[in-house]
Image (spheres, grey):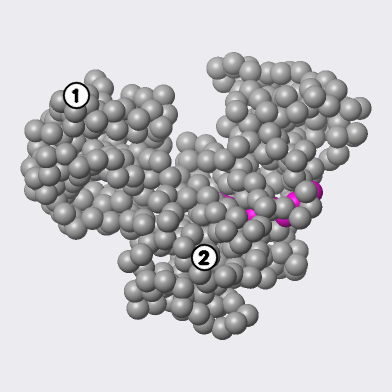
């Protein structure tokens, strides 16, 4: 859809979160009128109210398959979104990155590698700017590196020139009715690609490898387990790339400044994506990867105090990401775990906790006690804090009592944050503030 078409339409913007707020400002600057619906307590309150509009821009938090949106569609309303309109208006090639976790890390590293090669690009999404902030500055020669969630992909009818699919695990089952629905939303990132497009898929996960059957695009792979081509992979403790020039050594894994195999997956995906967008200079790529230290709140080293190291992994909101964080360490751990409920299955996490070097659990929030009980049933023999914590200071006071020199205190909640905190960032900020307060005390 083009802007001139919108000028003749009766438009509603449903929800004024960050994305739609920038969309609204952009439409207003173009003289395009719209009505706004916000601050509803449940979507049912909007029933019938949006049916009279020609175009409705939904918020990502309002599922495309919800009764409200489907009813409006059946009444002839065109359902759009900030993401869909950006795809219609963007003159540059879009590199879209999706997956349950790792989108921000991978997208940022892709952007930095492209920048190192002199390729002008714009980083957009949760970790970057909203794309409507810089839309008018983009040229056809640029790239836009864009994080894409399942909420944004669910009704996307255009696909990025280059689609990166990271690992997909159970997530947002409070938004999607089933895992199959969630997976179908993710698969839309490749389903409308053309033969001149590219898909970068994680070879190590059959569920992702199967995406190859859904796209006519050229496929490149990333892997930490198998030599793959074209793409990027790990072999004998080193990273290699294999594109038109054949297999080439890039760097030893030990020089990567990120912890955990999951970050190896992110690095190999980013290098493979950059290799499809530009011919890689090995030296520039190596230096870029070496200096990359990841993003805040993603297994972020905070401090070492009195022989104890503190890591902030508050971005871990699923069991799978907590498992990945635990596996990144070989020292005794005190794990702060739990939060608000997202209907996740914690049985595998509990088994990993029972078999790991975790010496103590500090269960917090709604899901913490559930995870602790499952861990005990799975054979966990360490300490479990038996308290109800009101805030992060109380949580950290308990952690300090349990810690000894050589230990690691890890915040990796495996759950959302909304029972005790405004969001995952606030949870991590409070954790880091408590660490610094203790260190300075």
Seen at 53% across and 65% down, the residue is 284
Q: Is residue 231 above or below residue 152?
A: below
Q: Residues within 10 Å of mark 2 (few under 14, many from 20)?
A: many
Q: Specify start and end residues of the magenta stretch as a single range.
A: 91-98
Quadrant of the image containing the C terminus = top left
Name the residue nearer the viewer: 170 or 241.
241
Q: Of tags 2 and 1, which is closer to the observer?
A: 2
Label 2: state its secondary structure: helix
Q: Percent position (x, y) of residue 408?
A: 18, 46
Residue 204 in sight in this render: yes
Name the residue nearer the viewer: 353 or 258.
258
Q: Percent position (x, y) of residue 237?
A: 34, 74
Quadrant of the image containing the N terminus = top right
Seen at 71% across and 18% down, the residue is 36
Label 1: state its secondary structure: helix
Residue hosting label 1: 394
Q: Percent position (x, y) of residue 191?
A: 68, 58
Residue 407 among those drawn in magenta: no
Main secondary structure found in the magenta portion: strand
Residue 153 in sight in this render: no
> Which image quarter: residue 68?
top right
Q: Percent position (x, y) of residue 398?
A: 14, 30
In three-dimensional space, the C-alpha distance between marks 2 and 1, rounded to whole angstroms, equals 44 Å
Residue hosting label 2: 285
């Amino acid at each position: 859809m083009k802007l001139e078409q919108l000028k003749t339409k009766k438009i509603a913007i449903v929800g004024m979160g960050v994305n739609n707020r920038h969309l609204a400002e952009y439409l207003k600057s173009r003289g395009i009128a719209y009505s706004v619906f916000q601050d509803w307590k449940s979507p049912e309150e909007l029933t019938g109210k949006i049916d009279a509009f020609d175009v409705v821009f939904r918020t990502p938090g309002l599922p495309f398959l919800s009764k409200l949106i489907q009813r409006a569609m059946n009444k002839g309303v065109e359902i759009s979104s900030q993401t869909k309109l950006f795809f219609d208006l963007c003159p540059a090639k879009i590199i879209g990155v999706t997956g349950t976790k790792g989108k921000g890390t991978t997208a940022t590293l892709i952007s930095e590698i492209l920048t190192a090669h002199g390729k002008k690009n714009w980083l957009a999404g949760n970790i970057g700017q909203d794309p409507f902030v810089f839309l008018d500055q983009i040229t056809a020669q640029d790239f836009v590196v864009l994080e894409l969630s399942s909420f944004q992909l669910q009704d996307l009818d255009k696909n990025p020139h280059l689609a990166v699919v990271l690992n997909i695990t159970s997530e947002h089952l409070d938004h999607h009715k089933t895992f199959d629905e969630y997976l179908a939303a993710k698969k839309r990132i490749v389903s409308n690609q053309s033969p001149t497009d590219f898909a970068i898929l994680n070879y190590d996960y059959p569920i992702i490898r199967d995406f190859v059957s859904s796209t006519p695009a050229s496929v490149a792979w990333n892997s930490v387990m198998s030599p793959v081509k074209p793409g990027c992979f790990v072999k004998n403790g080193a990273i290699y790339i294999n594109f038109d020039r054949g297999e080439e050594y890039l760097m030893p894994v030990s020089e990567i400044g990120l912890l955990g195999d999951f970050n190896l997956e992110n690095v190999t995906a980013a290098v493979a994506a950059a290799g499809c967008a530009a011919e890689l200079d090995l030296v520039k790529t190596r230096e870029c990867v070496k200096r990359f230290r990841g993003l805040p709140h993603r297994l972020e080293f905070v401090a070492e105090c009195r022989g104890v190291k503190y890591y902030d992994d508050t971005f871990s909101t699923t069991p799978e990401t907590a498992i990945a964080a635990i596996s990144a360490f070989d020292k005794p751990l005190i794990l702060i775990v739990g939060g608000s409920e997202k209907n996740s299955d914690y049985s595998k996490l509990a088994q990993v906790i029972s078999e790991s070097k975790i010496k103590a659990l500090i269960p917090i929030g709604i899901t913490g006690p559930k995870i602790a009980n499952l861990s005990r049933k799975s054979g966990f023999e360490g300490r479990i804090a038996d308290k109800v914590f009101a805030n992060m200071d109380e949580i950290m006071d308990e952690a300090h009592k349990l810690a000894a020199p050589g230990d690691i205190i890890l915040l990796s909640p495996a759950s959302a944050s909304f029972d005790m905190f405004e969001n995952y960032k606030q949870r991590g900020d409070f954790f880091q503030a408590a660490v610094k307060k203790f260190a300075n005390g």
